[in-house]
Protein backbone atom coordinates (compact mmCIF):
# COMPACT_ATOMS: atom_id res chain seq x y z
CA UNK A 1 0.00 0.00 0.00
CA UNK A 2 1.43 3.35 -1.06
CA UNK A 3 0.56 6.96 -0.21
CA UNK A 4 1.03 9.79 -2.73
CA UNK A 5 0.82 13.38 -1.52
CA UNK A 6 0.07 16.56 -3.41
CA UNK A 7 3.01 18.28 -5.14
CA UNK A 8 3.21 22.07 -5.42
CA UNK A 9 4.55 23.86 -8.48
CA UNK A 10 7.82 24.76 -6.72
CA UNK A 11 10.73 22.75 -8.01
CA UNK A 12 8.94 21.62 -11.13
CA UNK A 13 10.76 23.86 -13.58
CA UNK A 14 12.18 20.88 -15.44
CA UNK A 15 8.69 19.41 -15.76
CA UNK A 16 7.29 22.64 -17.23
CA UNK A 17 10.15 22.91 -19.72
CA UNK A 18 9.62 19.29 -20.82
CA UNK A 19 5.93 20.02 -21.30
CA UNK A 20 6.77 23.05 -23.46
CA UNK A 21 9.04 20.86 -25.61
CA UNK A 22 6.20 18.38 -26.00
CA UNK A 23 3.97 21.21 -27.19
CA UNK A 24 6.59 22.37 -29.74
CA UNK A 25 6.63 18.92 -31.37
CA UNK A 26 2.85 18.82 -31.92
CA UNK A 27 0.38 19.85 -34.61
CA UNK A 28 -2.95 21.52 -33.90
CA UNK A 29 -6.13 19.47 -33.63
CA UNK A 30 -9.00 20.48 -35.93
CA UNK A 31 -12.21 21.42 -34.14
CA UNK A 32 -15.70 21.64 -35.61
CA UNK A 33 -17.61 24.90 -36.03
CA UNK A 34 -20.36 23.61 -33.75
CA UNK A 35 -19.47 22.43 -30.22
CA UNK A 36 -22.19 19.80 -30.25
CA UNK A 37 -20.66 18.15 -33.35
CA UNK A 38 -17.15 17.62 -32.00
CA UNK A 39 -15.56 14.27 -32.74
CA UNK A 40 -12.31 13.34 -31.05
CA UNK A 41 -9.29 12.83 -33.27
CA UNK A 42 -8.73 9.31 -31.93
CA UNK A 43 -11.64 8.22 -34.13
CA UNK A 44 -9.86 9.63 -37.15
CA UNK A 45 -6.65 7.68 -36.51
CA UNK A 46 -4.78 10.66 -34.99
CA UNK A 47 -2.72 9.82 -31.94
CA UNK A 48 -3.27 11.97 -28.90
CA UNK A 49 0.46 12.58 -28.60
CA UNK A 50 0.27 14.56 -31.86
CA UNK A 51 -1.86 17.28 -30.26
CA UNK A 52 -0.45 20.76 -30.03
CA UNK A 53 -1.13 24.41 -29.54
CA UNK A 54 0.12 26.43 -32.50
CA UNK A 55 -1.99 29.52 -31.93
CA UNK A 56 -0.37 32.74 -30.71
CA UNK A 57 -1.22 34.12 -27.31
CA UNK A 58 -2.30 37.66 -26.56
CA UNK A 59 1.37 38.71 -26.58
CA UNK A 60 1.43 37.86 -30.30
CA UNK A 61 5.00 36.58 -30.11
CA UNK A 62 6.28 33.93 -32.49
CA UNK A 63 8.05 30.67 -31.72
CA UNK A 64 8.05 29.17 -28.24
CA UNK A 65 7.70 32.54 -26.51
CA UNK A 66 4.16 33.05 -27.84
CA UNK A 67 2.80 29.65 -26.83
CA UNK A 68 0.05 29.03 -24.30
CA UNK A 69 2.16 27.82 -21.40
CA UNK A 70 0.81 25.77 -18.51
CA UNK A 71 2.09 28.08 -15.78
CA UNK A 72 0.49 28.48 -12.36
CA UNK A 73 -1.25 31.77 -11.71
CA UNK A 74 -2.55 32.25 -15.28
CA UNK A 75 -6.28 32.01 -16.04
CA UNK A 76 -6.84 28.64 -17.80
CA UNK A 77 -8.32 28.73 -21.30
CA UNK A 78 -10.25 25.74 -22.72
CA UNK A 79 -7.20 24.86 -24.82
CA UNK A 80 -4.93 24.84 -21.75
CA UNK A 81 -7.39 22.60 -19.88
CA UNK A 82 -7.45 20.24 -22.87
CA UNK A 83 -3.66 20.18 -23.02
CA UNK A 84 -3.46 19.47 -19.30
CA UNK A 85 -5.76 16.45 -19.63
CA UNK A 86 -3.93 15.15 -22.71
CA UNK A 87 -0.59 15.56 -20.98
CA UNK A 88 -1.74 13.42 -18.06
CA UNK A 89 -3.01 10.75 -20.45
CA UNK A 90 0.27 10.75 -22.39
CA UNK A 91 2.25 10.19 -19.22
CA UNK A 92 -0.07 7.39 -18.10
CA UNK A 93 0.16 5.64 -21.48
CA UNK A 94 3.96 5.96 -21.44
CA UNK A 95 4.12 3.40 -18.61
CA UNK A 96 3.84 0.63 -21.20
CA UNK A 97 0.85 -1.10 -19.61
CA UNK A 98 -1.75 0.38 -21.98
CA UNK A 99 -2.71 -2.46 -24.42
CA UNK A 100 -2.00 -2.29 -28.13
CA UNK A 101 -5.20 -2.04 -30.15
CA UNK A 102 -5.80 -4.90 -32.60
CA UNK A 103 -8.80 -3.49 -34.47
CA UNK A 104 -9.47 -0.79 -37.07
CA UNK A 105 -11.26 2.52 -36.58
CA UNK A 106 -13.78 4.28 -38.82
CA UNK A 107 -16.73 3.74 -41.11
CA UNK A 108 -17.04 0.23 -42.54
CA UNK A 109 -18.24 1.53 -45.94
CA UNK A 110 -15.80 3.86 -47.70
CA UNK A 111 -18.11 6.38 -49.38
CA UNK A 112 -17.26 9.57 -51.24
CA UNK A 113 -19.25 12.23 -49.34
CA UNK A 114 -18.97 14.69 -52.25
CA UNK A 115 -20.91 12.40 -54.61
CA UNK A 116 -23.28 10.84 -52.09
CA UNK A 117 -26.60 12.25 -50.87
CA UNK A 118 -26.79 12.73 -47.11
CA UNK A 119 -29.89 10.57 -46.90
CA UNK A 120 -27.80 7.64 -48.17
CA UNK A 121 -25.74 7.69 -44.96
CA UNK A 122 -28.96 7.36 -42.98
CA UNK A 123 -30.18 4.56 -45.26
CA UNK A 124 -27.03 2.58 -44.47
CA UNK A 125 -28.52 2.19 -40.98
CA UNK A 126 -32.25 2.52 -41.68
CA UNK A 127 -32.80 0.74 -45.04
CA UNK A 128 -35.81 1.10 -47.36
CA UNK A 129 -36.91 -2.39 -46.41
CA UNK A 130 -37.63 -1.17 -42.88
CA UNK A 131 -40.02 1.51 -44.16
CA UNK A 132 -41.67 -1.09 -46.38
CA UNK A 133 -42.19 -3.27 -43.31
CA UNK A 134 -43.69 -0.36 -41.35
CA UNK A 135 -46.02 0.50 -44.26
CA UNK A 136 -47.18 -3.11 -44.48
CA UNK A 137 -47.86 -3.34 -40.74
CA UNK A 138 -49.61 0.05 -40.74
CA UNK A 139 -51.99 -1.05 -43.50
CA UNK A 140 -52.61 -4.30 -41.64
CA UNK A 141 -53.38 -2.52 -38.37
CA UNK A 142 -55.78 -0.09 -40.09
CA UNK A 143 -57.59 -3.06 -41.61
CA UNK A 144 -57.80 -4.81 -38.24
CA UNK A 145 -59.28 -1.62 -36.71
CA UNK A 146 -61.91 -1.45 -39.46
CA UNK A 147 -60.92 2.06 -40.56
CA UNK A 148 -63.48 3.06 -43.22
CA UNK A 149 -61.70 6.14 -44.58
CA UNK A 150 -58.21 4.63 -44.59
CA UNK A 151 -56.18 4.82 -47.80
CA UNK A 152 -53.20 2.46 -47.99
CA UNK A 153 -49.74 3.83 -47.35
CA UNK A 154 -46.40 2.80 -48.84
CA UNK A 155 -42.65 3.11 -48.32
CA UNK A 156 -42.14 6.65 -49.66
CA UNK A 157 -44.96 8.04 -47.56
CA UNK A 158 -43.43 6.52 -44.42
CA UNK A 159 -40.17 8.25 -45.33
CA UNK A 160 -42.09 11.54 -45.70
CA UNK A 161 -43.70 10.96 -42.30
CA UNK A 162 -40.24 10.43 -40.75
CA UNK A 163 -39.03 13.62 -42.47
CA UNK A 164 -41.84 15.61 -40.85
CA UNK A 165 -40.96 14.11 -37.47
CA UNK A 166 -37.32 15.20 -37.94
CA UNK A 167 -38.47 18.68 -38.99
CA UNK A 168 -40.44 18.93 -35.74
CA UNK A 169 -37.17 18.32 -33.88
CA UNK A 170 -35.52 21.37 -35.48
CA UNK A 171 -38.57 23.65 -35.77
CA UNK A 172 -40.34 23.21 -32.44
CA UNK A 173 -43.89 24.50 -31.96
CA UNK A 174 -46.30 24.15 -29.00
CA UNK A 175 -48.67 21.69 -30.75
CA UNK A 176 -48.20 19.51 -33.79
CA UNK A 177 -51.34 21.03 -35.37
CA UNK A 178 -49.49 24.37 -35.48
CA UNK A 179 -47.30 23.18 -38.34
CA UNK A 180 -50.38 23.27 -40.62
CA UNK A 181 -51.72 26.56 -39.24
CA UNK A 182 -52.81 29.23 -41.75
CA UNK A 183 -51.21 31.88 -39.53
CA UNK A 184 -48.13 33.06 -41.40
CA UNK A 185 -46.25 33.48 -38.12
CA UNK A 186 -46.99 29.95 -36.96
CA UNK A 187 -47.41 27.50 -39.84
CA UNK A 188 -44.46 25.81 -41.57
CA UNK A 189 -44.92 25.98 -45.33
CA UNK A 190 -42.55 23.10 -46.06
CA UNK A 191 -44.68 20.78 -43.93
CA UNK A 192 -47.99 22.06 -45.35
CA UNK A 193 -46.75 21.56 -48.91
CA UNK A 194 -45.62 18.01 -48.14
CA UNK A 195 -48.61 16.31 -46.52
CA UNK A 196 -52.14 17.42 -45.50
CA UNK A 197 -52.81 17.44 -41.81
CA UNK A 198 -55.63 14.91 -42.08
CA UNK A 199 -53.30 12.44 -43.74
CA UNK A 200 -50.54 13.01 -41.16
CA UNK A 201 -53.00 12.50 -38.33
CA UNK A 202 -54.34 9.35 -39.98
CA UNK A 203 -50.81 7.94 -40.39
CA UNK A 204 -50.00 8.81 -36.80
CA UNK A 205 -53.22 7.14 -35.68
CA UNK A 206 -52.58 3.80 -37.44
CA UNK A 207 -48.76 3.72 -37.51
CA UNK A 208 -47.58 0.26 -36.47
CA UNK A 209 -44.34 -1.71 -36.64
CA UNK A 210 -45.42 -5.24 -35.60
CA UNK A 211 -48.51 -7.37 -35.92
CA UNK A 212 -50.21 -7.44 -32.51
CA UNK A 213 -51.39 -11.02 -33.11
CA UNK A 214 -47.81 -12.26 -33.64
CA UNK A 215 -45.96 -10.68 -30.70
CA UNK A 216 -43.73 -13.36 -29.17
CA UNK A 217 -42.67 -11.81 -25.86
CA UNK A 218 -45.10 -9.10 -24.75
CA UNK A 219 -43.10 -8.55 -21.53
CA UNK A 220 -40.35 -6.76 -23.46
CA UNK A 221 -40.65 -3.01 -23.81
CA UNK A 222 -39.58 -3.25 -27.47
CA UNK A 223 -42.13 -5.93 -28.42
CA UNK A 224 -44.11 -3.36 -30.45
CA UNK A 225 -41.02 -2.37 -32.47
CA UNK A 226 -39.11 -5.66 -32.36
CA UNK A 227 -38.22 -5.68 -36.06
CA UNK A 228 -37.06 -2.06 -36.03
CA UNK A 229 -34.97 -2.58 -32.90
CA UNK A 230 -33.28 -5.73 -34.21
CA UNK A 231 -32.53 -4.19 -37.62
CA UNK A 232 -31.01 -1.04 -36.15
CA UNK A 233 -28.98 -3.02 -33.61
CA UNK A 234 -27.45 -5.09 -36.40
CA UNK A 235 -26.78 -2.20 -38.79
CA UNK A 236 -25.34 0.19 -36.20
CA UNK A 237 -22.80 -2.41 -35.21
CA UNK A 238 -21.90 -3.50 -38.76
CA UNK A 239 -21.42 -0.07 -40.32
CA UNK A 240 -18.85 1.35 -37.91
CA UNK A 241 -15.65 0.21 -36.21
CA UNK A 242 -15.24 2.09 -32.91
CA UNK A 243 -11.98 3.32 -31.44
CA UNK A 244 -10.11 1.45 -28.73
CA UNK A 245 -11.92 3.34 -25.97
CA UNK A 246 -15.57 2.47 -25.33
CA UNK A 247 -18.00 3.95 -22.83
CA UNK A 248 -20.77 1.97 -21.10
CA UNK A 249 -23.58 3.91 -19.45
CA UNK A 250 -27.36 4.28 -19.43
CA UNK A 251 -29.61 6.69 -21.32
CA UNK A 252 -33.17 7.71 -20.49
CA UNK A 253 -36.16 8.00 -22.87
CA UNK A 254 -38.69 10.40 -21.40
CA UNK A 255 -42.16 8.98 -20.77
CA UNK A 256 -44.64 9.93 -18.02
CA UNK A 257 -47.60 7.78 -18.99
CA UNK A 258 -48.70 4.47 -17.51
CA UNK A 259 -46.51 1.54 -18.46
CA UNK A 260 -44.66 -1.17 -16.58
CA UNK A 261 -40.90 -1.03 -17.01
CA UNK A 262 -40.81 2.72 -16.45
CA UNK A 263 -37.85 3.83 -14.32
CA UNK A 264 -37.56 6.75 -11.89
CA UNK A 265 -34.01 8.16 -11.66
CA UNK A 266 -34.11 11.42 -9.67
CA UNK A 267 -30.48 12.32 -10.34
CA UNK A 268 -30.80 12.17 -14.13
CA UNK A 269 -31.87 15.13 -16.32
CA UNK A 270 -34.70 12.89 -17.55
CA UNK A 271 -36.07 11.58 -14.28
CA UNK A 272 -38.93 9.38 -15.49
CA UNK A 273 -39.01 7.06 -18.48
CA UNK A 274 -37.40 4.00 -20.01
CA UNK A 275 -33.77 3.08 -19.41
CA UNK A 276 -31.52 2.10 -22.33
CA UNK A 277 -28.19 0.37 -21.67
CA UNK A 278 -25.69 1.82 -24.15
CA UNK A 279 -22.16 1.21 -25.38
CA UNK A 280 -20.79 4.13 -27.41
CA UNK A 281 -17.50 5.06 -28.99
CA UNK A 282 -15.82 7.30 -26.40
CA UNK A 283 -14.31 9.58 -29.01
CA UNK A 284 -17.31 10.60 -31.15
CA UNK A 285 -20.45 9.31 -29.42
CA UNK A 286 -21.45 6.75 -32.07
CA UNK A 287 -23.94 4.35 -30.47
CA UNK A 288 -22.61 0.85 -31.17
CA UNK A 289 -24.81 -1.47 -29.10
CA UNK A 290 -27.89 -0.91 -26.94
CA UNK A 291 -30.56 -2.74 -24.97
CA UNK A 292 -33.83 -1.30 -23.65
CA UNK A 293 -34.40 -2.35 -20.04
CA UNK A 294 -37.81 -3.99 -19.56
CA UNK A 295 -37.85 -4.03 -15.77
CA UNK A 296 -37.45 -6.87 -13.32
CA UNK A 297 -38.46 -10.36 -14.35
CA UNK A 298 -41.87 -11.66 -13.29
CA UNK A 299 -42.19 -15.10 -11.71
CA UNK A 300 -44.91 -17.67 -12.28
CA UNK A 301 -46.91 -16.25 -9.36
CA UNK A 302 -46.86 -12.75 -10.86
CA UNK A 303 -44.40 -11.30 -8.33
CA UNK A 304 -41.25 -9.39 -9.28
CA UNK A 305 -38.05 -11.43 -9.12
CA UNK A 306 -34.69 -9.76 -8.47
CA UNK A 307 -32.14 -10.80 -11.08
CA UNK A 308 -28.75 -11.56 -9.57
CA UNK A 309 -25.82 -10.34 -11.63
CA UNK A 310 -27.97 -8.08 -13.85
CA UNK A 311 -25.31 -5.41 -14.39
CA UNK A 312 -22.61 -7.96 -15.15
CA UNK A 313 -24.91 -9.60 -17.72
CA UNK A 314 -25.69 -6.22 -19.29
CA UNK A 315 -22.02 -5.26 -19.70
CA UNK A 316 -21.18 -8.70 -21.13
CA UNK A 317 -23.96 -8.35 -23.68
CA UNK A 318 -22.96 -4.81 -24.69
CA UNK A 319 -19.24 -5.52 -25.20
CA UNK A 320 -19.61 -9.04 -26.63
CA UNK A 321 -18.95 -7.88 -30.26
CA UNK A 322 -15.65 -6.27 -29.19
CA UNK A 323 -13.91 -9.20 -27.52
CA UNK A 324 -10.27 -10.19 -28.32
CA UNK A 325 -9.34 -6.73 -29.74
CA UNK A 326 -7.86 -5.08 -26.61
CA UNK A 327 -10.65 -2.53 -26.23
CA UNK A 328 -10.65 -0.43 -23.05
CA UNK A 329 -14.12 -0.01 -21.54
CA UNK A 330 -14.83 3.01 -19.32
CA UNK A 331 -17.76 2.74 -16.91
CA UNK A 332 -18.99 4.28 -13.66
CA UNK A 333 -19.43 2.72 -10.23
CA UNK A 334 -22.90 1.41 -11.13
CA UNK A 335 -21.30 -1.34 -13.22
CA UNK A 336 -17.70 -1.84 -12.06
CA UNK A 337 -16.87 -4.90 -9.96
CA UNK A 338 -13.86 -7.16 -9.46
CA UNK A 339 -15.43 -10.31 -11.03
CA UNK A 340 -16.47 -8.33 -14.10
CA UNK A 341 -12.92 -7.02 -14.63
CA UNK A 342 -11.53 -10.56 -14.30
CA UNK A 343 -14.07 -11.96 -16.78
CA UNK A 344 -13.44 -9.27 -19.41
CA UNK A 345 -9.66 -9.59 -19.06
CA UNK A 346 -9.92 -13.26 -20.07
CA UNK A 347 -11.44 -12.07 -23.35
CA UNK A 348 -8.89 -9.29 -23.98
CA UNK A 349 -11.13 -6.45 -22.85
CA UNK A 350 -9.73 -4.01 -20.29
CA UNK A 351 -11.61 -1.84 -17.79
CA UNK A 352 -11.22 1.62 -16.27
CA UNK A 353 -14.00 2.68 -13.92
CA UNK A 354 -15.04 4.21 -10.66
CA UNK A 355 -16.13 1.79 -7.97
CA UNK A 356 -18.03 1.72 -4.71
CA UNK A 357 -16.39 0.33 -1.60
CA UNK A 358 -19.25 -2.13 -1.23
CA UNK A 359 -18.75 -3.61 -4.73
CA UNK A 360 -17.61 -7.21 -5.12
CA UNK A 361 -13.84 -7.59 -5.22
CA UNK A 362 -12.94 -4.29 -3.55
CA UNK A 363 -10.05 -4.84 -1.06
CA UNK A 364 -11.29 -5.00 2.51
CA UNK A 365 -8.29 -3.13 3.92
CA UNK A 366 -9.10 -0.07 1.73
CA UNK A 367 -12.75 0.22 2.76
CA UNK A 368 -12.05 2.30 5.87
CA UNK A 369 -9.26 4.41 4.35
CA UNK A 370 -9.89 8.14 3.87
CA UNK A 371 -6.73 9.87 2.49
CA UNK A 372 -5.92 13.51 3.15
CA UNK A 373 -7.18 16.12 0.71
CA UNK A 374 -5.35 15.80 -2.61
CA UNK A 375 -3.86 12.37 -1.76
CA UNK A 376 -4.66 8.84 -2.85
CA UNK A 377 -3.98 5.32 -1.64
CA UNK A 378 -3.55 2.37 -4.00
CA UNK A 379 -3.30 -1.41 -3.85
CA UNK A 380 -2.89 -4.13 -6.49
CA UNK A 381 -4.79 -7.41 -6.20
CA UNK A 382 -4.64 -10.04 -8.99
CA UNK A 383 -3.26 -7.49 -11.49
CA UNK A 384 -6.12 -5.07 -10.73
CA UNK A 385 -5.16 -1.69 -9.27
CA UNK A 386 -7.58 -0.18 -6.77
CA UNK A 387 -7.39 3.52 -5.83
CA UNK A 388 -8.99 5.61 -3.09
CA UNK A 389 -8.59 9.27 -4.06
CA UNK A 390 -9.70 12.25 -1.96
CA UNK A 391 -10.38 15.11 -4.35
CA UNK A 392 -13.56 17.13 -3.78
CA UNK A 393 -14.87 13.94 -2.23
CA UNK A 394 -13.56 10.40 -1.84
CA UNK A 395 -13.64 8.54 -5.15
CA UNK A 396 -12.58 4.93 -5.76
CA UNK A 397 -11.17 3.57 -9.02
CA UNK A 398 -10.44 0.09 -10.33
CA UNK A 399 -8.45 -0.69 -13.47
CA UNK A 400 -6.24 -3.33 -15.04
CA UNK A 401 -4.78 -0.90 -17.58
CA UNK A 402 -2.80 1.65 -15.58
CA UNK A 403 -0.12 1.09 -12.89
CA UNK A 404 -0.23 2.32 -9.29
CA UNK A 405 2.04 5.35 -9.78
CA UNK A 406 2.46 8.03 -12.43
CA UNK A 407 5.88 8.89 -13.86
CA UNK A 408 5.25 12.54 -13.01
CA UNK A 409 2.70 14.97 -11.67
CA UNK A 410 -0.02 16.42 -13.91
CA UNK A 411 -1.59 19.86 -14.02
CA UNK A 412 -5.15 20.10 -12.66
CA UNK A 413 -7.61 22.98 -12.64
CA UNK A 414 -8.15 24.37 -9.15
CA UNK A 415 -11.20 26.05 -7.61
CA UNK A 416 -9.62 29.51 -7.95
CA UNK A 417 -9.14 29.04 -11.72
CA UNK A 418 -5.40 28.31 -11.65
CA UNK A 419 -3.49 25.21 -12.72
CA UNK A 420 -1.48 23.34 -10.13
CA UNK A 421 0.74 20.28 -10.46
CA UNK A 422 -0.71 17.40 -8.51
CA UNK A 423 -0.18 13.67 -8.10
CA UNK A 424 -3.37 11.85 -9.15
CA UNK A 425 -4.32 8.22 -9.88
CA UNK A 426 -2.91 7.30 -13.30
CA UNK A 427 -6.35 6.33 -14.60
CA UNK A 428 -7.99 9.67 -13.75
CA UNK A 429 -7.00 11.69 -16.89
CA UNK A 430 -8.13 8.87 -19.18
CA UNK A 431 -11.39 8.40 -17.27
CA UNK A 432 -12.23 12.11 -17.53
CA UNK A 433 -11.47 12.10 -21.26
CA UNK A 434 -13.21 8.91 -22.35
CA UNK A 435 -16.09 8.30 -19.93
CA UNK A 436 -18.46 10.73 -21.67
CA UNK A 437 -19.13 8.70 -24.83
CA UNK A 438 -22.76 7.87 -24.01
CA UNK A 439 -23.29 11.40 -22.65
CA UNK A 440 -22.13 12.73 -26.02
CA UNK A 441 -24.63 10.41 -27.74
CA UNK A 442 -27.45 11.75 -25.58
CA UNK A 443 -26.39 15.36 -26.05
CA UNK A 444 -26.45 15.04 -29.83
CA UNK A 445 -29.90 13.44 -29.69
CA UNK A 446 -31.31 16.11 -27.38
CA UNK A 447 -30.04 19.01 -29.50
CA UNK A 448 -32.44 18.41 -32.41
CA UNK A 449 -34.43 15.44 -31.13
CA UNK A 450 -38.21 14.95 -31.39
CA UNK A 451 -39.69 15.63 -27.96
CA UNK A 452 -43.47 15.64 -27.86
CA UNK A 453 -45.97 14.06 -25.49
CA UNK A 454 -47.55 10.84 -26.68
CA UNK A 455 -49.97 8.32 -25.19
CA UNK A 456 -48.43 5.30 -26.88
CA UNK A 457 -45.22 4.47 -25.06
CA UNK A 458 -43.52 2.80 -28.01
CA UNK A 459 -43.80 6.01 -30.05
CA UNK A 460 -41.27 7.54 -27.67
CA UNK A 461 -38.87 4.63 -28.19
CA UNK A 462 -39.36 4.55 -31.97
CA UNK A 463 -38.71 8.27 -32.46
CA UNK A 464 -35.74 8.04 -30.08
CA UNK A 465 -34.20 5.45 -32.40
CA UNK A 466 -34.99 7.64 -35.42
CA UNK A 467 -32.95 10.50 -33.90
CA UNK A 468 -30.11 8.18 -32.89
CA UNK A 469 -29.98 6.72 -36.41
CA UNK A 470 -29.69 10.17 -38.02
CA UNK A 471 -26.92 11.13 -35.59
CA UNK A 472 -25.02 7.91 -36.29
CA UNK A 473 -25.43 8.59 -40.02
CA UNK A 474 -23.91 12.02 -39.45
CA UNK A 475 -20.89 10.48 -37.72
CA UNK A 476 -20.42 8.08 -40.66
CA UNK A 477 -20.59 11.08 -43.01
CA UNK A 478 -18.06 12.98 -40.92
CA UNK A 479 -15.60 10.09 -40.87
CA UNK A 480 -15.75 9.82 -44.66
CA UNK A 481 -15.24 13.58 -45.00
CA UNK A 482 -12.11 13.44 -42.85
CA UNK A 483 -10.86 10.44 -44.83
CA UNK A 484 -11.01 12.34 -48.16
CA UNK A 485 -9.94 15.69 -46.68
CA UNK A 486 -13.31 17.47 -47.03
CA UNK A 487 -14.70 19.84 -44.42
CA UNK A 488 -17.92 18.30 -43.04
CA UNK A 489 -21.13 20.19 -42.39
CA UNK A 490 -22.43 20.72 -38.89
CA UNK A 491 -25.11 18.44 -37.44
CA UNK A 492 -27.89 20.94 -38.14
CA UNK A 493 -26.85 21.31 -41.76
CA UNK A 494 -26.72 17.53 -42.17
CA UNK A 495 -30.19 17.11 -40.67
CA UNK A 496 -31.66 19.82 -42.89
CA UNK A 497 -30.28 18.10 -45.98
CA UNK A 498 -31.75 14.78 -44.85
CA UNK A 499 -35.13 16.38 -44.10
CA UNK A 500 -35.16 18.06 -47.51
CA UNK A 501 -34.49 14.75 -49.25
CA UNK A 502 -37.26 13.00 -47.30
CA UNK A 503 -39.87 15.72 -47.84
CA UNK A 504 -39.13 15.75 -51.58
CA UNK A 505 -40.46 12.18 -51.73
CA UNK A 506 -43.95 13.65 -51.28
CA UNK A 507 -44.02 14.24 -55.07
CA UNK A 508 -44.35 10.50 -55.51
CA UNK A 509 -47.23 10.47 -53.02
CA UNK A 510 -48.93 13.43 -54.71
CA UNK A 511 -49.02 11.60 -58.07
CA UNK A 512 -51.38 9.12 -56.44
CA UNK A 513 -49.15 6.06 -56.46
CA UNK A 514 -51.20 4.48 -53.71
CA UNK A 515 -54.42 6.44 -54.17
CA UNK A 516 -53.86 8.74 -51.21
CA UNK A 517 -56.65 11.03 -50.04
CA UNK A 518 -54.80 14.33 -50.10
CA UNK A 519 -57.80 16.41 -48.94
CA UNK A 520 -58.40 20.09 -49.63
CA UNK A 521 -55.73 22.76 -49.06
CA UNK A 522 -55.96 24.85 -45.89
CA UNK A 523 -58.72 27.44 -46.13
CA UNK A 524 -60.44 30.14 -44.11
CA UNK A 525 -62.99 29.27 -41.46
CA UNK A 526 -66.34 29.20 -43.32
CA UNK A 527 -68.37 27.57 -40.54
CA UNK A 528 -71.73 28.79 -39.37
CA UNK A 529 -73.78 28.15 -36.24
CA UNK A 530 -75.30 24.67 -36.02
CA UNK A 531 -78.76 26.24 -35.62
CA UNK A 532 -78.58 27.61 -39.18
CA UNK A 533 -78.29 24.12 -40.67
CA UNK A 534 -80.77 22.47 -38.35
CA UNK A 535 -78.28 20.75 -36.01
CA UNK A 536 -77.53 20.93 -32.31
CA UNK A 537 -74.24 21.18 -30.45
CA UNK A 538 -72.28 17.90 -30.35
CA UNK A 539 -69.13 16.07 -31.36
CA UNK A 540 -67.22 16.95 -34.50
CA UNK A 541 -68.29 14.41 -37.12
CA UNK A 542 -64.87 14.45 -38.79
CA UNK A 543 -63.31 13.40 -35.46
CA UNK A 544 -65.82 10.57 -35.24
CA UNK A 545 -65.18 9.41 -38.83
CA UNK A 546 -61.41 9.38 -38.23
CA UNK A 547 -61.95 7.09 -35.22
CA UNK A 548 -60.22 9.50 -32.86
CA UNK A 549 -60.47 8.31 -29.23
CA UNK A 550 -63.61 9.63 -27.57
CA UNK A 551 -61.66 11.59 -24.95
CA UNK A 552 -59.89 13.54 -27.71
CA UNK A 553 -62.96 14.26 -29.86
CA UNK A 554 -63.95 17.92 -29.96
CA UNK A 555 -67.44 19.24 -29.09
CA UNK A 556 -68.53 22.17 -31.20
CA UNK A 557 -71.50 24.43 -31.94
CA UNK A 558 -70.30 25.20 -35.48
CA UNK A 559 -71.02 23.40 -38.74
CA UNK A 560 -70.02 23.42 -42.40
CA UNK A 561 -72.78 25.14 -44.48
CA UNK A 562 -72.01 22.93 -47.48
CA UNK A 563 -71.87 19.51 -45.80
CA UNK A 564 -74.32 20.34 -42.97
CA UNK A 565 -72.13 18.47 -40.49
CA UNK A 566 -70.57 19.61 -37.23
CA UNK A 567 -66.87 20.52 -37.61
CA UNK A 568 -64.46 21.60 -34.88
CA UNK A 569 -62.13 24.57 -35.27
CA UNK A 570 -59.09 22.33 -35.84
CA UNK A 571 -60.58 20.67 -38.93
CA UNK A 572 -62.07 23.92 -40.19
CA UNK A 573 -58.77 25.81 -40.48
CA UNK A 574 -56.94 22.81 -41.90
CA UNK A 575 -59.57 22.06 -44.53
CA UNK A 576 -61.77 19.04 -45.22
CA UNK A 577 -63.29 17.41 -48.24
CA UNK A 578 -66.76 18.89 -48.70
CA UNK A 579 -69.09 16.30 -50.19
CA UNK A 580 -71.10 18.90 -52.15
CA UNK A 581 -67.98 20.44 -53.69
CA UNK A 582 -66.43 17.17 -54.97
Image (cartoon, grey):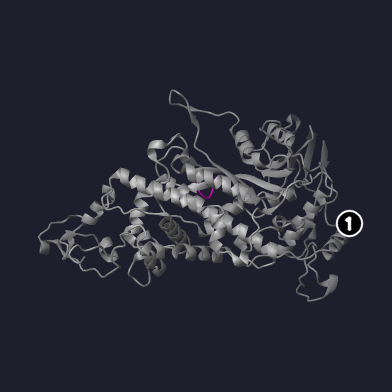
Left or right for 402, reference 545? right
Residue name at image x 64 percent, y 63 percent: 112
Residue occupying image coordinates x 71% and y 60%: 417
Question: Furthest-bottom residue in view?
Answer: 60
Give the answer, above or below, for where 100 lies relative to 536.
Answer: above
Residue 482 horizontal/vertical position (percent): 68, 63
Where residue 31 sits, quadrant-wise, is bottom right
Few, some or many residues within 10 Å of mark 1 (<14, 14–19, 20+) = few
Give the left or right position of residue 3, taking residue 300 as reference.
right
Tell me the quadrant of the picture where the C terminus can be found: bottom left
Give the image quarter of residue 359. top right
Q: Secondary structure at mark 1?
A: loop
Q: Looking at the picture, tell me which residue is in the foreground, 580 or 292.
A: 580
Please report the bounds of the magenta region as a residue range: 267-271
- Magenta segment, principal secondary structure? loop
Q: Which residue is mark 1?
A: 11
Q: Is residue 284 above or below residue 190?
A: above
Q: Residue at x 53, y 50 (%)?
A: 269
Give left or right: position of 2 versus 273. right
268 inside magenta stretch = yes
Q: Residue at x 78, y 48 (%)?
A: 424
Q: Nearer the viewer, residue 207 or 400?
A: 207
Question: Quick one: which residue is furthest to the left in this view?
Answer: 534
Residue 553 at x, y = what percent?
A: 26, 52
Note whether residue 475 is visible. Answer: yes
In this orientation, does residue 38 appear? no
Q: Quadrant of the N terminus?
A: top right
Q: How many marks?
A: 1
Of residues 535 and 87, the one drawn nearer to the viewer in this rendering: 535
Q: Position of residue 412 (x, y in %)?
A: 75, 55
Tell whether position 370 is magenta: no
Amino acid sequence: MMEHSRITLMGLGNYVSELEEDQDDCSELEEDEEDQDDCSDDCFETDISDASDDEDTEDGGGGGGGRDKLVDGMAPTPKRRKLAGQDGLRKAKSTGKYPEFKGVVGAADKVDPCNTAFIDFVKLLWPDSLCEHIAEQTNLYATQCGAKSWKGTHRDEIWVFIGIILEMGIHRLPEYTDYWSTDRLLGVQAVKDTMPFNRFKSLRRYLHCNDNTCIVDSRKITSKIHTVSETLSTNHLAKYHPSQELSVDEMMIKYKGRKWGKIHMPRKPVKLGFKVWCCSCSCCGYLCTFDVYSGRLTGSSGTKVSEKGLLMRVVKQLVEPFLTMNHVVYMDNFYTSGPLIVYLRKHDVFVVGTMTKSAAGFPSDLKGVVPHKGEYVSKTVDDICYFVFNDRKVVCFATNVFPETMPDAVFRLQADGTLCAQSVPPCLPAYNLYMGGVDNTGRMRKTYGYDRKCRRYWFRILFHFVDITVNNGYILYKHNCVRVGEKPKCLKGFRLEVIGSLLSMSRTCARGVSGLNLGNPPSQDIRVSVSRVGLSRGRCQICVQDRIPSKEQKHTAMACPNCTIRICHEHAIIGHRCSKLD
